[in-house]
């Protein structure tokens, strides 16, 4: 475009004023003319690469600081060892050497004045301690001055011992005191020379120890400065790492989390944009693509949900109509069946003598079929009434319900010779008629499906666990196989022939519907042997104390 061309043409002569064109292409660029770092190239780095660069640089700096710290500590240790193990020990050994020599001089002088041999004990002990201290001094004297001082001390000690101590310690009787008095002035002069040598040695060792302490103080000061610098550098690295992680990783992640959180809260139209390292931007791109697909799927699923709700409503209405039809049909079939049974019974009573045996058998078949159909219709009516026709929820004393049920079934119980027992039963909230039907079906089944080999024993137990009562109706009858534990609660399911055990196959299905209507569950305990154990639960009353289980 014309404006840009004019500005560039004006800038070129200024940048290369006075320079030939050939040199203009080869001349190095100034810092102002260098291209800025490419943000796109920097943004291509992934989070792992950023972490590798940052951690690598931090580790390199920390390694250098670690080496420096180790060197400082090693140097401090060397200076400390020099002070403690050599200089201080050398001074202590020198003092012990001096004490040993003083003991020798005291012992020799006492022996020379008194002639008593017991005065030689300090001398002999001093000789032993002198040898020990001398060995330590020879091992610890490493500098020329220290060696020269030690040589002078040992020389003065040897002169004193050769001229004074040894001759006097070997003399006997009068020879002891006479040489001692004659050599008193010479002995004092020789030991004073030794004392001066030892004093000079200790002065030099004391000065060396003071110099060592000064060196140690200097090293410790340097150590503190180095470690302070290391701490500052580590703190700076930590700040840089924190800022880098914050700006390069944490903030982009927080923005991505905020965008995804807004979408998760229901704003599916909110776009998700990526920032930071390349992998985070790729992640944001993938999440954005997923958001778009979810938006499309949400629209589709919303439409499907509406259709499903309509279908569910149709099914509910159809089931209600079907239940109503079953109830009405069952109710309306009772009267014709009652007439069929009544007229068949009248026909058998009045004309049985006029009919042959086959005709009477046909009449019996008709009566039996009508009675069986009536029982089936009654069971169907009971099944359809559960959950649809019921009394108001009231407090139901299961003790009374149990007593009424046992009284109702007393004839069949007496015929079977069954023995019944039960735990104290609680009071629950529910429909008394349906709960009575529940116990009646369970107890009648326990009596019906008894074993011919043993006396029927039936027990009803109740235990409270939390906010639920757990009941069990157990018997010692023929039992229920584990493979039939679910099947027995399905309507019209029979495990035995009608000839072996009469019934319609609806009783346990009614029990299941009653228990579920009251908010409980029902099932078969597969571990109970012999016989069967039907377990079910019912909600406990909220105001009822939880003491039944303890009792």
Image (cartoon, rainbow, N blue to C red):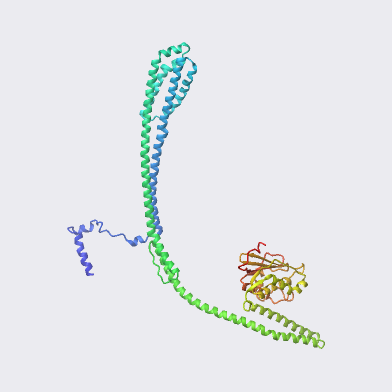
Q: Quadrant of residue 43?
A: bottom left
Tell whether 410 sits left or right of 174: right
Q: Quadrant of residue 131?
A: top left
Q: Relative to residue 196, is residue 424 depicted above or below?
A: below
Please say whether residue 296 is visible from this viewpoint: yes
Q: Residue lying farthest right? A: 353
Q: Residue at x 76, y 86 (%)?
A: 344
Q: Position of residue 241 (x, y in %)?
A: 38, 55
Q: Position of residue 88 (x, y in %)?
A: 41, 32
Q: Position of residue 96 (x, y in %)?
A: 43, 27
Q: Position of residue 145 (x, y in %)?
A: 35, 28
Q: Quadrant of residue 136?
A: top left
Tell whether 415 sits left or right of 294: right
Residue 121 vs residue 2, the one in the foreground: 121
Q: Residue lying farthest left? A: 18
Tell whether 148 sits left or right of 352: left
Q: Residue at x 37, y 39 (%)?
A: 219
**In the rendered image, which quarter contains the C terminus?**
bottom right
């Amino acid at each position: 475009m014309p404006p840009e061309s004019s500005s560039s043409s004006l800038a070129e002569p200024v940048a290369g004023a006075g320079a030939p064109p050939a040199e203009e292409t080869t001349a190095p660029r100034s810092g102002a003319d260098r291209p800025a770092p490419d943000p796109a190239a920097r943004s291509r780095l992934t989070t792992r690469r950023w972490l590798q660069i940052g951690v690598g640089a931090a580790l390199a700096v920390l390694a250098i600081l670690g080496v420096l710290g180790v060197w400082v500590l090693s140097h401090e240790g060397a200076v400390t060892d020099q002070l403690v193990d050599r200089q201080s020990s050398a001074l202590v050994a020198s003092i012990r050497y001096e004490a040993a020599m003083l003991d020798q001089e005291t012992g020799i002088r006492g022996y020379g004045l008194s002639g008593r041999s017991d005065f030689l004990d300090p001398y002999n002990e001093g000789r032993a301690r002198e040898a020990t201290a001398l060995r330590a001094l020879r091992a610890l004297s490493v500098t020329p001055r220290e060696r020269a001082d030690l040589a002078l001390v040992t020389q003065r000690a040897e002169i004193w011992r050769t001229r004074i101590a040894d001759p006097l310690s070997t003399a006997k009787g009068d020879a002891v005191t006479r040489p001692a008095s004659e050599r008193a002035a010479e002995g004092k002069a020789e030991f004073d020379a030794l004392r001066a040598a030892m004093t000079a040695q200790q002065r030099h060792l004391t000065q060396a120890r003071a110099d060592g302490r000064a060196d140690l103080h200097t090293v410790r000061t340097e150590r503190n400065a180095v470690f302070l610098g290391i701490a500052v550098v580590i703190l700076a690295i930590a700040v840089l790492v924190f800022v880098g992680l914050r700006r390069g990783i944490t903030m982009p992640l927080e923005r991505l989390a905020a965008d995804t959180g807004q979408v998760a809260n229901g704003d599916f139209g909110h776009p998700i944009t990526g920032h930071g390292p390349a992998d985070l931007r790729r992640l944001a791109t993938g999440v954005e693509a997923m958001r778009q697909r979810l938006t499309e799927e949400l629209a589709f699923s919303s439409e499907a949900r509406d259709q499903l709700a309509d279908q569910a409503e149709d099914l509910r209405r159809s089931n209600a109509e079907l239940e109503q039809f079953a109830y009405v049909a069952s109710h309306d079939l009772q009267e014709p069946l009652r007439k069929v049974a009544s007229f068949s019974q009248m026909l058998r009573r009045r004309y049985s003598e006029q009919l042959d045996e086959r005709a009477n058998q046909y009449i019996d078949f008709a009566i039996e079929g009508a009675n069986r159909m009536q029982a089936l219709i009654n069971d169907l009516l009971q099944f359809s009434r559960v959950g649809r026709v019921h009394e108001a929820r009231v407090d139901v004393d299961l003790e009374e319900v149990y007593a009424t049920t046992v009284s109702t079934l007393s004839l069949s119980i007496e015929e079977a010779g069954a023995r019944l027992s039960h735990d104290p039963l609680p009071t629950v909230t529910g429909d008394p008629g349906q709960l009575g039907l529940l116990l009646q079906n369970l107890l009648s089944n326990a009596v019906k499906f008894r074993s011919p080999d043993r006396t029927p024993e039936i027990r009803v137990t109740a235990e409270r666990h939390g906010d639920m009562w757990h009941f069990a109706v157990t018997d010692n009858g023929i039992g229920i196989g584990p493979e039939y534990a679910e099947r027995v609660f399905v309507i019209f399911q029979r495990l035995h022939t009608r000839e072996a055990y009469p019934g319609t196959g609806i009783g346990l299905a009614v029990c299941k519907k009653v228990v579920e209507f009251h908010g409980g569950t029902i099932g078969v305990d597969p571990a109970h042997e012999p016989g069967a154990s039907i377990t079910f639960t019912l909600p406990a009353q909220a105001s009822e104390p939880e003491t039944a289980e303890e009792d």
